[in-house]
Image (spheres, grey):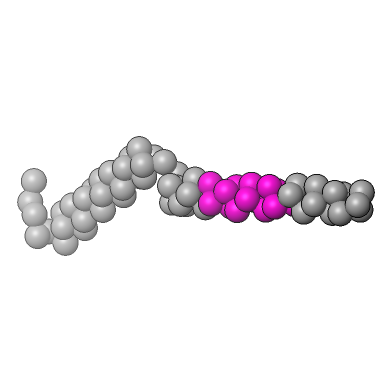
């Protein structure tokens, strides 16, 4: 009789931990997907603006060197 109670107690404790593990895995995947390359949205915005300005300046410099634009 006591063995049955011990088995029931162990089974119920194990089931509770299984549910917690599943919830923890779901929380980890949702928080991990919010970032791309480890950057926030604002950091990605500034990086894209920086790349755009680099392409603009280099393109303008190439056009000036090839004399397609005269300043």
Residue 64 quadrant: bottom left
The residue nearer to you, when weighing 31 against 47, is 31
Would you say residue 2 sits in the magenta stretch? no
At 21% from the left and 50% from the top, the residue drawn is: 56
Q: Residue at x 49, y 45 (%)?
A: 31
Of 8 and 58, which appears nearest the observer? Answer: 8
Most foreground residue, 13 or 36: 13
Span colored in magenta? 14-28
- Which residue is situated farthest in the front direction here? 1
Q: Give the image location of residue 18, x and y in percent.
A: 67, 53
Identify the residue at horizontal 12%, vertical 59% (top origin): 67
Please state if 52 lies on the left or on the right of 31 as rendered.
left
Q: Is residue 61 visible?
A: no
Residue 57 in picture, x, y percent from top left: 23, 48
In the image, residue 68 above or below residue 24:
below
Picture coordinates of residue 43 (x, y %)?
39, 40
Number of labelled discs?
A: 0
Residue most extreme to the right: 2
Residue 46 in view in this figure: yes
Secondary structure of the magenta portion, mostly? helix
Please tell me which residue is depicted at 28% across the width and 44% down the height of the picture.
49
On whether residue 16 falls in the magenta region, the answer is: yes
Percent x, y for residue 65? 19, 57
Horizontal side of residue 57 vs 40, given as left or right: left
Q: Is residue 29 left or right of residue 6?
A: left
């Amino acid at each position: 009789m006591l063995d049955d109670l011990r088995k029931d107690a162990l089974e119920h404790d194990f089931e509770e931990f299984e549910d917690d593990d599943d919830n923890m895995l779901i929380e980890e995947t949702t928080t991990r997907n919010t970032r791309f390359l480890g950057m926030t949205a604002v950091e990605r915005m500034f990086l894209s603006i920086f790349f755009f300005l680099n392409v603009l300046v280099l393109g303008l410099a190439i056009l000036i060197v090839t004399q397609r634009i005269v300043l």
